[in-house]
Structure formats: structure tokens, C-alpha cells
Amino acid sequence: MLLMTLLAPFGWAIVVPFLWRIWGRRGGRLAVLLPSALFVFYASRLASGKTWTERYAWAPALDIEMALHFDGLSGTYLLLITGIGALIALFAVPYEIPARHVGGFDSLMVGFMGAMQGLVLADDLLTLFVFWELTSITSYLLIGFDSEKREARAAARQALLITSTTAMAMLFGFLLLGELAGTRRISELHEHADAIVASPSYPGILILIAIGAFAKSAIAPFHFWLPNAMTAPTPVSAYLHSATMVKAGIYLLARLRPTLSGSDLWFFLLGTASVATLLVGAVRVVNEFDLKRVLAETTVIGLGALLLVLAIPTPYGVRAFAVFLVVHALYKAALFMIAGAVQHSTHTRNLRELSGLWKAMPVTSVAAVLSGVAMMGMPPMLGFIGKELIYDATLDAPRFSLLWVTAAFTGNAAMVAGALLVVHHVFFGRRLPATEIAREPPPGMLVGPCVLGLLSLVFGIFHDPIQNVVVEPSLRALTGTPLAEHEIELWGGISTALVLSIATVAAGVTGYVERDRLIRLTRLVPGIFRRRLENGYRLILDAIAWTAHAQTRVIQNGRLPIYGAVFVGVAASALFVSVVGGPGFSRAVHEGHTFVDVASSAAIVLGVGVAVSARARFSAALGVSLAGFGLGILVALLGATDVALAQFGAESLLLIAVVLATRRTAARYGPARRSSGTFLALRAALASLLGAGAALALLRATQAPFEDELSNHFIANTVEVARGHNVVDAILVDFRVLDTLGEITVILILALSLWPLHRKTARRTEESDTRSPS
């Protein structure tokens, strides 16, 4: 069943464009059916409290299998992927996607959902990597969906380059981890945790995997790609950049937490990165005036908070992680959809032009208030519980608790200010002329924000479903034991966490009110916390482009003789390297020479001499062909008649092609010009080196002990498998049939290309004869 649920979205992605083509928007609404059905299925499996594993052979010879595993952590992610995916599919129906592209857009969204399902269900490191890269590819297509805009193409390229290049480091870490543990099954890695942490390879493994995870989840120093990706259509931002792809790196670290977290390096690496991310997001959010970029910067803060509690090596950190994962997904997906609804109604995202929309958009305003209050962490919303659990976890940290609390406080205060910017500033400020055209968006765009906002309220008051379906299963998956003695609750009495929550709201409101002063203050912050890293990315790209241009000017200069000289020189060097350092030549290869041997060898030498000394192109071609035919005769004498026939055919076609080509070049460019003596000497030296290197390499090959295993295999299987009696023929047309097919194809293409060349040459000759006097 897991495999079927995994493959279903990819099949549905093929069907969705036809639904749009046949039924239009009504067909688009049918796209909601699959994610809704998958949500119900995963919810029933998660409520049962059972784990589920399936294995399928993928590449048995390489010991690679597709292993799928369902438990509390993967089940929670799958509920977010499918549930929010269904609401966003409904939101996207009335969204302003060009009619000719809307089917493809929905298809990409469903395909991305399938890739995310595979990522969280994967129980094999290589399987996880495959789906990891598939999410990068589909997200690249979605971010750059509006491909006519330069900024969309640049943002998509940036996201792909950052996530894919760092994924190579992660893959290397996966391979080292699998080799060290003796297994690539993620569910079995924790059994070898002590040996892995004690290994000298452990720091490298952790850092390599963390690089890939940090980049995917926009953790500093890779945070800057996420705000730039806001050029994507709003359904993409609401889905990829709130609840799914940006949490993939966090998911990976959470999944590997039982295996890799038993060291101080885990604590300090993740803790330091999370603090930097929280501070960077807090500085940047107050400087944004684009509605979606404000939400993107607060997403960076939320991801930093998730990483912070994941770094803390206590069950309280895991509990805060499980709750805040759901909290953030609910309010952030809703707010992104609200931003899309505002843009749909006002045709702008500029905060300088947005204010006082509550009268024109009352339902949207209510949904915005619910999600905004949840983002601020106000009671009775689930966000209030999540914020207090973050403070509980940081206060319980074994070391540097004050640093973690300060970072969490700064990030949460910036979240409050960001929520007020998105909700209070946009909906309850003074009405501006740019918003006079505002109106309530279509109902399909309001279902998602309203449902998610209400869920934040309901789960804050009645939080048993979160405790039983999310927290407890996640704790069992990450720690092996539940934390029943510390259930989540809305009111836990007067505590340090409550005081910090109140102070957070006060600080956030103050920052919102004094935003102009805060912007001036942030200019004193070092540039690395603002735009310096993004500028560094651009400098790296410019350096790569300059290097490519410089080396192309030298290597790809458009002069064919230079290309040939480089090729021959490299080939000759490679041949000599293969010979140098080996044993001496101990025996002769061939004894006794017949007249035909001597004659064919003389033909080769004569052909080379003609080719080198010829002044005309045609004469040089004849010399080359003479040498080739002589070589073919030698090969035939050694018993390889089929190879000799191929050589004769190739030389014949080459000679015909050269003759036809030289007739045209002679008419256009005149006779060939004599090269300088220096250039001739250089060409002769390179050709001699290549020939000597090839001869010595062949001699070296004959000195090696003859291994007859492969020969015996061909001889033994020629009759039984190939149904033939000629071993060479069987090798060419059966055992190496694709290689032979490729050679035939090359010769056929060359032969076919001779016909139009002949026709053009014949036509020119006829025209020349017609114009000439009789």
C-alpha cells in the first residue's frame, strides 16, 4: 500500500492536465480528490499508532533497494503534505495562472507532492537522495514557472544551484554513513549509533549531511534563496515554502537524530546555525516591504526555531519540535494564501500601498486575524502552546541556556512584528487609494485560510488530537519512548516560559510601532546579517562565468588545427603514461615476415609520407587513405577479416567525403596554403608521438599475462546462447550488439551525408559548365 500511495501522485500528475482540458475549472477542482484521499488514508494509519515497512528490490547487484517506512514522524509530515496540498490545490483553481499553462502547473504541484511523499517515506539513504533531488527539480520548475520574467528564472536557478550542489556533499555523507554502519536502512542506523559517534569519520559525516540539510531548509548561511523564491506563484510559496520543501532538511536531521545526536558536535553545530538563522531572519524581516518576502523572512525564523529545539538533546526539545512543526505549517500556509488573495484583489504586494482592507475583504480579514494571532503566539491559539514549548526546551538546555533563550526570544519577537505587518498593517490601517479596487476573492481562495486558521484555534483549545496523533508518535519515532508525564497544555500556570511569552509580544509590538527607528538601527548590524551573503553568491557566479569565458577564449578559439593538436597531444601523453613505469619488453610479438607484411607496411609508410609532404588537399587525402588501407591489410593478415572490412569501408567513405568536400572548398577558398615550417614540425612531432605511444601501448598489452576467462566465456556461450559457430561474429552481433549498432549508425550517417554533398557539388559543376563558353 505504501508503494501505491507513493506512485499515485505521479500517475495523477499525468491525468490532471486532461481534467483541465476536458472540464476546465471544474476539472481543476477534481485535482483535490487525490491529496484528500491520501490525507484520510495517512490519518487513519497514524491514528492506529502502528509502524509500517515495505521493501522492494531496486538494483540487487548494487545492494540498492526501495525501502519505505511509516511511523509517527513520517506520518505527521505526510498529513501536512497531503492536507495542506489539498487546500492549496483548491486555492489554485481561481488563481491567476494563464489558461494555457494551468494544467501543467497543477501537474507539477502534484508531482512535487509525490516527491515529498517519497522523501519522508524513504527508509534507504539512496532512495531518500533520489526523492530529495526530485523535489529540487520540481521546485525549480515551479519557482521559475513564470519563465518570461527574468527574476523568476534567476530565483529558480539560485534555488536549484544551492540545493543541488550542497546535496552532493550530503550524498557523500550518506555513503560514508552507510559504509560505517554496514547498512543504509535509516530505521536500523540507530542500532549502530555508539560506533558511529565514536568513529573518526563522524565529524565529517555530520558536517556533510548538515550542509545539505541546511541548504534545503534555508538555514544560515544558505537562507537568502528563500525570500528570492517569492517570485513564484503564491500557491507554490504557500505549499513549498511553508509546509513541505523547506522542512525537508529539518526532517532529515530529525530522522537521523537518534543516530547522530550523541555528541557535543551535534549540539553546537545545529545550535550555532539556528542562532545565526534566527538573528538573520529577525534583522531582515523589519526591512522588507513586500508582503510575501515578509512571510518568507518569518519562515526563515520559524525554521531556525525548529532547528534550535532539534539541537537540544532532551525530550523537551523533541516535544517542542513536534508541536511547532504543525503550528508553523498551519499559520504560514494560511498567511501565504491570504497574501495571494490580497494580491489577487489589489494587484500589488507592496506594503506601502496596502492598508485598510478589512471592509472590502471581511472574510479574508477574519482568516488573517486567526492565523496572525497564531503566529504571534497568543492564547488560545496552538501557536501559544508552541511558543511556550520552545521556551521550555531552551530553558531545559544542558548548556548555554541563556544564549538559546535570547535567540529564541529575538526570533519570536520578530515573528510578532511580522504578523502585525501582515495583518494589522494590511487590513486595519488607513485605507489607501491603491486598495479602492479591493474585493473579496473567490470562495475557493478562502477555504484554505479559513480552515487552517480555525484548526489553529481548535487545536489550541482542544489539543488532545495533537498530543495523541502528533506528539506521542513523533516522540516514539525520535526517542523510542513517549513523554506522557509532560502533556501539552494551554495553561501551565505562572512560569518563566509564560513571562517570556508576554515579553515577546510586548517586544514585537514595540518593534512594529517603532519600525522606522528599527530599520535605521539595523543598518548598524554587520552586513553578513543583511545582504552580504547574497552578494557573495553573485560574486561566485560571476567568477565562474569569467573563468569559463577566459578558458573558452583559449581552448575553444574556433581554429580546428588547435583543437586537433590538443586532442592528439593529450592522447599521446595518455598512451605514454600507460607505458612508462612498466616492465621491459621481454619478447617479440611477431616472428617471420611475409612479402605481404612488408608490402602493406611499406604502403603505410608511403601513405604517411604523401600525406605529410602533399601540397594539395586531395593528395593528402589519398596518402591518408593509402595508410589506412595498408593497415587494414595487416589486420586481415592477423585473422581479423571483419575488422579489416570495417576499416576498408570507413576509409572508402572517408576518401569519398574528402574528395567531395575538397571540390567545394577549392572553388570557394582556392588551393591550400602551405603551412610554415614550424607548424609542420609541430604537427609531425605530435603525430609521431601519438603513433609511438600507440605502438608502445600495444606492445605493453602483449607482454601482460594472457587472461583467458573472457575468451572462454565467449567460446562457451557462442553456441548455446548466441546460436552461432563463429566466435567473432557472435561477439559483434550478439554479445556487443549495441556497440556494433553504434558503429553501423555512424557509418550510415556518414554515407547518407555524402548524398546531399554530392548533389550540391554536381549542381555547382553543371552551373559552371553552363556559364562557360562552348
Image (tube, helix red, strand yellow):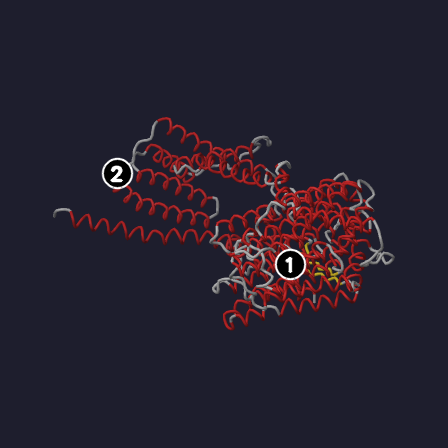
Residue at numbered disc 1: 333
Marks 1/2 in contact by CB < 8 Å: the verdict is: no
Label 1 crowd (10 A; few <14 / some 14-19 / many >=20): many
User: From the viewer's perspective, is residue 649 above or below residue 81?
Assistant: above
| In the foreground, 600 or 358 | 358
Please give left or right for residue 595 compared with residue 320 in the image. Answer: left
Tell us which disc is closer to us: 1 or 2: 1
Q: What residue does disc 2 label?
A: 670
Q: Secondary structure at mark 2?
A: loop
User: Could you tell me which quadrant the N terminus lies in?
Assistant: bottom right
Type of amino acid at the residue the image marks with label 2? Gly
Name the residue at 57% across, 52% down. Answer: 351
Residue 189: horizontal and vertical position, in percent?
Answer: 77, 51
Q: Quadrant of residue 443?
A: bottom right
Residue 407 percent coordinates (x, y): 73, 43
In the rendering, at what x and y percent does residue 191 appear? 81, 51
Q: Is residue 684 visible?
A: yes
Residue 303 seen in render: no
Mark 2 packing: few (<14 Cα in 10 Å), some, or many (20+)?
A: few
Q: Which mark is residue 705?
A: none
**Which quadrant would residue 402 be assigned to in this image?**
top right
Q: Residue furthest front?
A: 430
In the picture, measured across the screen, residue 591 lies left or right of residue 266, that is left
- At label 1, which amino acid type do we have? Ala
**Marks 1 and 2, the one that precedes in the sequence:** 1
Q: How many marks?
A: 2
Q: Is residue 276 left or right of residue 733?
A: right
Whole-percent x, y for residue 626 in the image: 36, 40
